[in-house]
């Protein structure tokens, strides 16, 4: 009798662990783009870490293929068909090791985010608020500063501005989010601020240095008129008046 109970408990434990694994690390529809130009499409999973990639042609395939992250240019996921997500392994000014980051906006200055829990970042789709750029900006931006930009843009510029930021994720509900910026001539991503991580750089200091070629913008950052939460607005200001 005891032996049967132990066997039942063992089976239940395996089943429970497999359910937890499926809940936290499922395969998601996506593509892997390699540095050599090759592309594979199917389902992708981050196994034990962001640097442990598994791939299948479909969920029906029994054995997964292990993908070497050093050969990967980017991973694209399609959990939201309207807004594919792009993940990269990038050099940053924070470490000699590569960072797993998500590209949230590509422009003259591109914006990337990372987290101390990079697997959670990859699987944070269900926790992401995908409102339109205007809805996001209306809530996240300082009303006075937003109006300053808004009234200086033409109607077409306003439409382009809000359309470009419609792919930004307003709330990635994981504990720590680090924000990196990248200009085309930079070798590494530059950390400019962090939410939920007081040990990282002060935004005022980091952003002042990053945008030092734009005194008008630096003045707004120094006065705290523009803060980390105004990052899209800061980039747009830089494009329009400083670049």
Image (cartoon, helix red, strand yellow):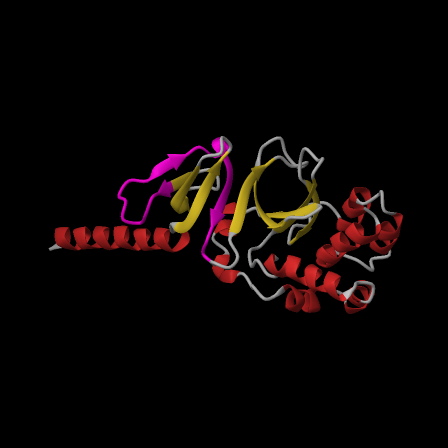
Which is more toward the observer, 200 or 81? 81
Residue occupying the point 31% across, 49% down? 59
In the displayed structure, 2 sits above or below 46; it is below
Judge from the rendering whether residue 218 lies leftward or rightward of residue 48; answer left or right: right
Q: Residue furthest front?
A: 156
In the displayed structure, 56 sits above or below 236; it is above
Judge from the rendering whether residue 82 lies leftward or rightward of residue 215; answer left or right: left
Give the position of the N terminus as an image quadrant. bottom left
Residue 63 magenta: yes
Which is more toward the observer, 89 or 238? 238
Residue 233 position in % (x across, y down): 75, 58
Residue 242 position in % (x across, y down): 83, 48
Choose top left, top right, bottom left or bottom right for residue 190.
top right
Judge from the rendering whether residue 116 lies leftward or rightward of residue 225; answer left or right: left
In the displayed structure, 106 sits above or below 143; it is above
Residue 28 magenta: no
Judge from the rendering whether residue 15 lies leftward or rightward of residue 224; answer left or right: left
Residue 205 position in % (x across, y down): 80, 46
Q: Residue furthest left?
A: 1
Magenta segment boundaries in residue numbering:
55-79
Residue occupying the point 77% across, 45% down? 206
**Number of numbered discs overlaid on the protein picture:** 0
In the displayed structure, 240 sits above or below 70; it is below
Q: Is residue 169 visible?
A: no
Q: Is residue 64 visible?
A: yes
Which is more toward the observer, 36 or 126? 36
Residue 19 position in % (x across, y down): 32, 55
Residue occupying the point 28% across, 44% down? 61
């Amino acid at each position: 009798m005891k032996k049967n109970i132990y066997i039942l408990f063992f089976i239940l434990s395996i089943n429970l662990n497999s359910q937890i694994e499926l809940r936290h690390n499922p395969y998601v529809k996506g593509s892997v783009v390699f540095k050599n130009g090759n592309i594979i499409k199917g389902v992708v999973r981050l196994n034990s870490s962001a640097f442990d990639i598994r791939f299948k042609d479909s969920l029906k395939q029994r054995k997964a293929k292990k993908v070497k992250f050093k050969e990967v240019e980017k991973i694209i996921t399609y959990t939201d068909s309207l807004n594919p997500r792009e993940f990269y392994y990038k050099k940053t000014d924070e470490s000699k090791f590569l960072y797993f980051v998500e590209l949230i906006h590509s422009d003259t200055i591109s914006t990337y985010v990372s987290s101390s829990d990079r697997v959670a970042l990859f699987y944070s789709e269900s926790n992401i608020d995908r409102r339109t750029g205007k809805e996001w900006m209306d809530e996240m931006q300082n009303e006075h500063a937003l109006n300053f930009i808004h009234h200086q843009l033409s109607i077409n510029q306003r439409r382009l501005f809000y359309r470009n930021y419609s792919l930004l994720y307003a709330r990635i509900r994981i504990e720590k989010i680090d924000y990196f910026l990248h200009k085309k001539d930079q070798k590494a991503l530059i950390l400019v601020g962090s939410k939920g991580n007081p040990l990282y750089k002060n935004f005022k200091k980091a952003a002042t240095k990053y945008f030092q070629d734009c005194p008008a913008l630096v003045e707004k950052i120094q006065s705290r008129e523009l803060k980390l939460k105004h990052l899209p607005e800061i980039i747009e200001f830089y494009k329009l008046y400083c670049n």
